[in-house]
Image (tube, coloured by chain):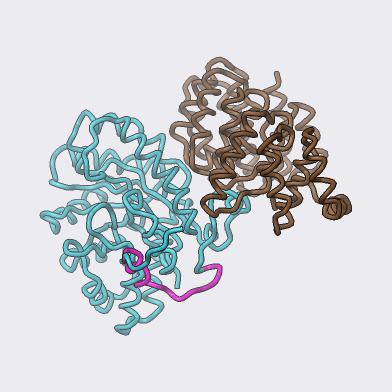
Chain colours: A brown, B cyan
């Protein structure tokens, strides 16, 4: 049911953004797909969407985004373009007809996808019916070095938070750092933080420091709640940084720690803490 | 000056090449599906190859501010492996409509066997059905007759010469190709196909209408700056700038743009979704450096000791 509702919502947004000819073409393809017996018509439809329809951003309103989130918690199409929405609407209708077969179809589509198809397919996992096959394919997708494809899974997508086990979650976070992506758009970042991840991230920070490379301040967000022992030493080093964002990240992380030493360091950094409290800085803005 | 290299097997090239190409002014490349040196023996490896040129290679090029397009086809060498060829023909329609596919190619003749002929014709029909341009690989051996025959077959199948690029031309073939209304491409490939001094002479003799220059750089000893170097040499030797632009940029855009998959806006004014995700922007377009065509050579000197 959810798939039809998602498709209908996407189609209502598309209707306002397509001109007459584009709408006629798209409606005809949807009608054709209802009765198609093979996947050939589906391949052709998906192939033609970016050729027949615009590729501009949907530019959804706050009200639109609220509708999306109400329908499927965590679904965030704020950076979707028109062709992305059209392809996902089509796939939701196909998925609704046979949710079991959809997993295999999803896998095949991913295996022969071009770059923007890959991104679209993985963005769609926010709303597609869950299956073992799709889950395996998402794991495969995470192994990519194409940042945009990785981010289609990791960013603004409720799937990882809901479905990943701790091992896969931790590796997604680490991989995000490794390919210079950002953490803030990952849903459930605070809820899914864990001790194992905090240790892995501190090791990673030490590696970066040893190589004379920058450590993104965002990293400490996943460390703070579990910081104790040498991790507190790391955070002390971070708050003493000459870079503002690093220092603020360290302060945020220490505030999340229940270790008594964290409170001591925070007390020593009262001036900077005051500065931070007066500002509008958040974890989200520290990435920028 | 902006350049397009309408024939470059980037899958075989390293990042230094992308850097040098971007610095020299290349804004777009077309990667024709071809063989990769080692013959493929399974359709599965073919599928992964085609997926690579529509996927990862496009991403890789985007990191250097170069827009990557490709052509999809069964090449003439591997057309001689009938079992493989049959299976590849089955999967081609699934790939031919992917984003950035600007032609069916490179197809044509190698040894001019019956099997080559069979699959060449089948792919011309596919191009007709999908309304795509065609990139023709003309044979290295028995070239003149092979080139004429390729054009004969295209005409026999009712394809418009204006949608067909005949590639790897030389002094012996160019006249007929132009007279018959096809696009004539030249591969500046050291020692075998074409040198750029000869190319400049051809521009001097024929002008630049329907002529385009490419590098055909691949896994062999080849020159990814073939287009930029030819443009520079042509200007030095007095070829008018307008003609250099036609041969090194505009004609490729006009010929392959007929696919609807390649537009100047792709690099001059990319859609926001691309700017956020897959295309870093070209240094030439950002800062307008003059073409640098010699810079890359000293990268391999061990005098540059520090690696960060």
Can residue B90 be seen from the camera position used here? yes
Q: Position of residue B154 (x, y in %)?
A: 26, 49
Please give left or right for residue B44 compared with residue A33 in the image.
Answer: left
> Quadrant of the rendered structure where residue B166 is?
bottom left
Residue stretch rendered in magenta on the structure:
B285-301
Identified at 63% across, 44% down, the residue is: A21
In magenta stretch: residue A245: no
In this view, the residue in front, B160 or A111, is: A111
Please give left or right for residue A12 compared with residue B265 in the image.
Answer: right
Can residue A80 be seen from the camera position used here? no
Residue A259 vertical placement versus B254 (above, below): above
> Quadrant of the rendered structure where residue B185 is?
bottom left
Please give left or right for residue B265 compared with residue B148 in the image.
Answer: right
Please give left or right for residue B210 compared with residue B270 in the image.
Answer: left
Q: Position of residue A105 (x, y in %)?
A: 50, 23
Q: Position of residue A276 (x, y in %)?
A: 83, 52
Residue A17 vertical placement versus B244 (above, below): above
* Residue at the farthest left position: B142
Identified at 40% across, 79% down, the residue is: B241
Quadrant, the N terminus of chain A = top right
In this view, the residue in front, B281 or A223, is: A223
Q: Position of residue A48 (x, y in %)?
A: 52, 40
Identified at 35% across, 34% down, the residue is: B47
């Amino acid at each position: 049911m959810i798939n039809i509702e998602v498709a209908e919502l996407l189609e209502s947004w598309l209707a306002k953004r397509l001109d007459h000819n584009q709408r006629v073409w798209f409606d005809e393809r949807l009608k054709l797909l209802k009765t198609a017996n093979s996947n050939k018509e589906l391949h052709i439809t998906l192939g033609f969407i970016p050729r027949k329809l615009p590729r501009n951003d949907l530019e959804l309103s706050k009200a639109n985004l609220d509708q999306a989130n109400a329908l499927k918690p965590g679904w965030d199409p704020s950076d979707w373009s028109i062709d992305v929405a059209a392809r996902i609407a089509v796939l939701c209708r196909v998925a609704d007809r046979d949710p079991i077969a959809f997993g295999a179809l999803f896998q095949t589509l991913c295996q022969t996808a071009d770059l923007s198809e890959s991104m679209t397919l993985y963005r769609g996992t926010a709303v597609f019916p869950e299956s073992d096959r799709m889950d395996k394919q998402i794991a495969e997708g995470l192994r990519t070095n194409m940042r945009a494809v990785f981010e289609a899974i990791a960013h603004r997508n409720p799937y990882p938070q809901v479905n990943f086990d701790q091992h896969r979650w931790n590796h997604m976070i680490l991989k995000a750092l490794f390919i210079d992506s950002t953490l803030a758009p990952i849903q459930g970042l605070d809820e899914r933080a864990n001790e194992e991840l905090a240790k892995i991230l501190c090791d990673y920070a030490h590696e970066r420091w040893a190589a004379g490379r920058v450590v993104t301040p965002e990293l400490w967000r996943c460390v703070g709640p579990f910081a104790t022992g040498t991790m507190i030493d790391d955070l002390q080093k971070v708050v003493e940084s000459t870079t503002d964002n690093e220092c603020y990240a360290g302060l945020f992380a220490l505030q999340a720690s229940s270790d008594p030493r964290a409170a001591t360091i925070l007390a020593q950094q009262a001036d900077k803490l005051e500065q931070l409290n007066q500002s509008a800085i958040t974890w989200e803005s520290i990435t920028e | 000056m902006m350049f397009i290299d309408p024939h470059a097997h980037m899958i075989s090239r390293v990042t230094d090449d992308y850097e040098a190409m971007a610095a020299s002014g290349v804004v777009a490349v077309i990667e024709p599906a071809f063989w990769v040196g080692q013959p493929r023996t399974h359709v599965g490896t073919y599928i992964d190859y085609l997926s690579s040129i529509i996927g990862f290679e496009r991403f890789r090029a985007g990191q250097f501010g170069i827009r990557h397009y490709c052509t999809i086809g069964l090449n003439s060498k591997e057309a001689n492996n009938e079992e493989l060829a049959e299976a590849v023909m089955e999967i081609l329609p699934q790939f031919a409509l992917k984003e950035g596919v600007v032609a069916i190619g490179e197809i044509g003749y190698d040894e001019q066997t019956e099997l080559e002929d069979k699959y060449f014709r089948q792919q011309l029909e596919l191009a007709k059905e999908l309304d795509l341009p065609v990139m023709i690989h003309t044979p290295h051996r028995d070239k003149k007759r092979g080139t004429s025959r390729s054009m004969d077959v295209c005409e026999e199948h009712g394809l418009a010469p204006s949608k067909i690029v005949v590639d790897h031309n030389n002094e012996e073939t160019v006249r007929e190709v132009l007279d018959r209304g096809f696009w004539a491409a030249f591969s500046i490939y050291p020692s075998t196909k074409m040198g750029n001094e000869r190319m400049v002479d051809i521009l001097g003799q024929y002008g630049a209408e329907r002529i385009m220059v490419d590098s055909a750089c691949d896994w062999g000893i080849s020159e990814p700056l073939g287009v930029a170097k030819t443009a520079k040499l042509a200007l030095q030797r007095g070829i008018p700038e307008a003609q250099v632009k036609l041969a090194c940029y505009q004609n490729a855009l006009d010929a392959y743009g007929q696919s609807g998959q390649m537009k100047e806006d792709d690099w001059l004014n990319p859609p926001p979704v691309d700017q956020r995700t897959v295309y870093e922007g070209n240094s030439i377009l950002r800062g307008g450096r003059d073409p640098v065509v010699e810079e890359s050579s000293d990268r391999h000197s061990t005098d540059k000791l520090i690696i960060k």
